[in-house]
């Protein structure tokens, strides 16, 4: 692994067998994630974007060993500057690394135990990793919980209360404090604001961004929402049917998309100005095909307005089209996708 790289995912594949009949014979395969590779630097934020069913959540779960990978590797650099393949490490050796790999969940309502006080919720990981975190005493952990609450914008008195006493945004702040408690190097955030009111989404995103920068946390953000992406990501990987279709620095992706699917996603962002909406050129029709029966050739061809015979037969490679910008499309040299990009530039994304 190159210096500065926190996570190096190579050719990660997760396929699920489908079994049926009285003998539970394998009758098919769900190809949830196929041949995904990317790198995440220390302190960098990478968004995995795509519609529901594109494989982003399966990818994250496989990385955190919720599922066993079918193939591939995911090298993670620890605090002690050692690299381990998360996908192959025996589970007992994975346990000590858990502290450095944390998750922020989508639903702040169900991710907090309603029978535990906030002190217990945030204090639990501190107690489990007391030695490594330097908080061996109960009083030390209480003080640390108070500090964490202040960092996420809550009052220290919140420690005595139960989750039901808080709003959705405040619960997500409690979840973030619990995540920070273990001083993680990598945080996987799965649609962290999609369950919240629009009015508090920007506050939570700003908080995550501030804490991520302050502690140089590597963040893998899974989302379907491109507004969120632009707000918090350094780079973006667009996924479709389990494969990466385009990856680019965030501004490049928004201003010069190289893949028709990305252009269609950008064009689908709601705009307040109807004149801009009327000039929209790329429509995303149809639905994502089943990963059990993916199309031949380019997985996007049944929905792509530019598809040609070659697209129906040959899978395009992920090609480098500029520094840090890769695209999986046979026709990237010929297509002019800047109409969608120009519209996207006018879209307010901050609030
Ligand atoms: Fe469309 Fe063909 Fe490019 Fe696939 S390879 S995105 S079908 S133009």
Image: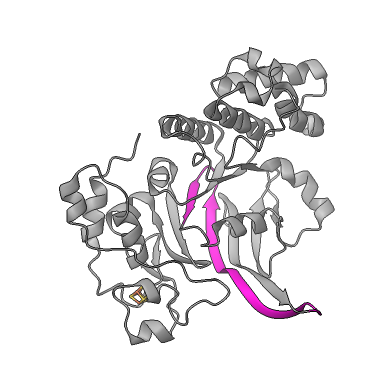
Whether residue 183 sits left or right of residue 285 in the image: it is right
Residue 6: in sight, yes or no? yes
Residue 159 drawn at (x, y percent): 68, 18
In front of the other: 82 or 161: 161
Residue 212 drawn at (x, y percent): 53, 36
Residue name at image x 68 percent, y 53 percent: 64
Q: Quadrant of the C terminus?
A: top left
Q: Is residue 140 above or below residue 249?
A: above
Residue 61 is a magenta residue: no
Q: Main secondary structure of the magenta part?
A: strand
Q: Is residue 199 above or below residue 261?
A: above
Q: Is residue 178 above or below residue 242?
A: above
Q: Quadrant of residue 152?
A: top right
Whether residue 270 sits left or right of residue 150 in the image: it is left
Residue name at image x 63 percent, y 14 percent: 156
**Ligand 1 location (quadrant):** bottom left
Residue 52 drawn at (x, y percent): 50, 58
Question: Which residue sits furthest left?
Answer: 275
Whether residue 119 sits left or right of residue 286 in the image: it is right
Q: Quadrant of residue 171?
A: top right
Q: Quadrant of the N terminus?
A: bottom right
Q: Which residues are magenta?
A: 22-49
In this rendering, the count of numbered labels is: 0
Residue 1: in sight, yes or no? no
Residue 30 is a magenta residue: yes
Residue name at image x 36 percent, y 65 percent: 261
Residue name at image x 55 percent, y 62 percent: 55
């Amino acid at each position: 692994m190159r210096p500065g790289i926190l996570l190096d995912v190579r050719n990660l594949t997760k396929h699920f067998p489908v079994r049926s009949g009285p003998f539970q014979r394998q009758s098919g395969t769900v190809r949830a994630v196929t041949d995904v590779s990317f790198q995440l630097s220390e302190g960098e934020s990478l968004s995995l974007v795509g519609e529901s069913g594109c494989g982003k959540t399966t990818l994250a779960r496989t990385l955190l060993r919720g599922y066993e990978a079918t193939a591939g590797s995911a090298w993670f650099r620890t605090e002690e500057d050692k690299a381990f393949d998360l996908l192959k490490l025996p589970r007992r050796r994975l346990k000590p690394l858990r502290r450095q790999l944390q998750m922020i969940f989508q639903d702040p309502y169900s991710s907090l135990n309603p029978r535990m006080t906030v002190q217990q919720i945030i204090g639990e990981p501190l107690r489990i990793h007391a030695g490594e975190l330097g908080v061996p005493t109960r009083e030390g952990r209480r003080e640390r919980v108070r500090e964490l609450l202040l960092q996420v914008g809550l009052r220290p008195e919140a420690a005595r209360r139960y989750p039901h006493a808080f709003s959705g945004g405040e619960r997500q702040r409690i979840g973030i404090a619990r995540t920070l408690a273990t001083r993680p190097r990598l945080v996987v955030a799965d649609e962290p604001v999609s369950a919240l009111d629009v009015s508090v989404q920007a506050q939570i995103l700003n908080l995550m961004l501030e804490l991520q920068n302050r502690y140089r946390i590597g963040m893998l953000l899974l989302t379907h929402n491109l507004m969120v992406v632009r707000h918090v990501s350094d780079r973006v990987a667009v996924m479709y049917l389990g494969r990466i279709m385009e990856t680019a620095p965030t501004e490049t992706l928004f201003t010069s998309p190289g893949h028709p699917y990305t252009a269609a996603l950008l064009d689908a962002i709601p705009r307040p100005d109807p004149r801009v909406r009327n000039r929209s050129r790329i429509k995303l029709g149809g639905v994502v095909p089943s990963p059990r029966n993916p199309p031949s050739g380019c997985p996007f061809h049944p929905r792509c307005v530019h598809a040609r015979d070659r697209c129906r037969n040959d899978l395009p490679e992920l090609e480098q089209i500029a520094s840090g910008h890769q695209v999986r499309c046979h026709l990237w040299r010929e297509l002019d996708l800047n109409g969608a990009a120009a519209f996207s530039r006018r879209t307010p994304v901050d609030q």
